[in-house]
Amino acid sequence: MKRLGSVLVFCLVLLEASVAGSYRVRAEDSNVGFTVMKWVVFKEEGRFKDYHGLINYDRNAPRNTSVDFTVKTASIDSRNSDRDNVIRGREFLDASRFPTLRFKSVSAEPHGSDTLMITGDFTIRDVTKRITIPVRISGVSRVGDLGEVVGFETSFTVDREDYGVATGMSMLGKDVTIHMIIGAATGSSSASR
C-alpha cells in the first residue's frame, strides 16, 4: 500500500511538471510580423527576424502566466533594403538609439477555453504604454529533448504615433497591426526541428 501511495505521488509530480513550465521562444518556430496601411490604399507587410522571449505558463493556473518578449529593431525586414534602412532611421524606429521593442506582462486573465487576455507594458523608442492583448494557446505537447513545447498566437493593434513613430506622416496609417505566432519549449531552444 505504501508503494502504491508513493507511485501515485510520483505520478502527480510528473503531471504537475507537465502542465507548468518556463518556456523559451524558439525563433525557428515563430514569426513576428506587422501590417500598416500605405497611401490609404493597401497594406504594407513586414516582419522582425531577431527576437527572444521567456514565457511562464501553467495550464492549471493560467492567471500565473507571465511574458517577457524583446525584439531587435534593426532586424526589420520589409522585403526592400532601402525601405528597411528608412524604417531603422531616426523618424521611425531609430534603431541606433532604441535597439529593442519590449513587451513585459503584469497580469493574465483567462478568456474562454483557449485564450488569455494578457496585460503588460509595451515599449517602443523608450515610450511605454500599458496594453492588453488576446493570446490564444494552440496547444501543449512533449517533443523529445525539447521537453514541453507550447504554441501561442496573438494579433493586436497599436497607434504608432503614441510611441513617437513617424509622427505626422500622412502616407501611412496610424494603426499598426502586430501578428505573432510563437513556438516555445522548456528544453533546448537552439536545435532546429
Image (tube, rainbow, N blue to C red):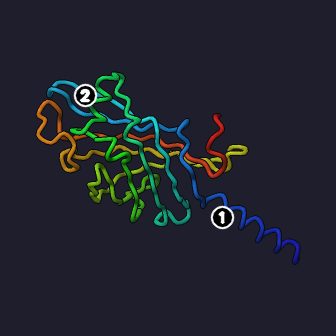
Residue 94 x/y as whole percent: 28, 41
Q: Quarter-wise, where is residue 14 in the image?
A: bottom right
Q: Is residue 106 left or right of residue 35?
A: right
Q: Amino acid at mark 2?
A: Lys
Q: Is residue 14 left or right of residue 92?
A: right
Label disc, if present, on residue 181 of the rendered structure? none
Residue placed farthest to the front in the image?
A: 96
| Relative height, residue 12 to residue 29 (above, below) | below
Upstream in the sequence, badge 2 or badge 1? 1
Q: Is residue 11 left or right of residue 29?
A: right
Q: Is residue 140 left or right of residue 15?
A: left
Front-most of residues 54 and 168: 168
Density class for disc 1 (Cα within 10 Å; few <14, some 14-19, many ≥20) is some
SS of the residue at dot 1? helix
Residue 142 x/y as whole percent: 67, 47
* Residue carrying label 2: 43
Q: CA distance from mark 2 to mark 1?
A: 44 Å
**Residue drawn at (65%, 34%) of the image:** 193
Q: Quarter-wise, where is residue 10 in the image?
A: bottom right
Residue 35 x/y as whole percent: 29, 33
SS of the residue at dot 2? strand
* Residue carrying label 1: 16
Residue 44 x/y as whole percent: 27, 27
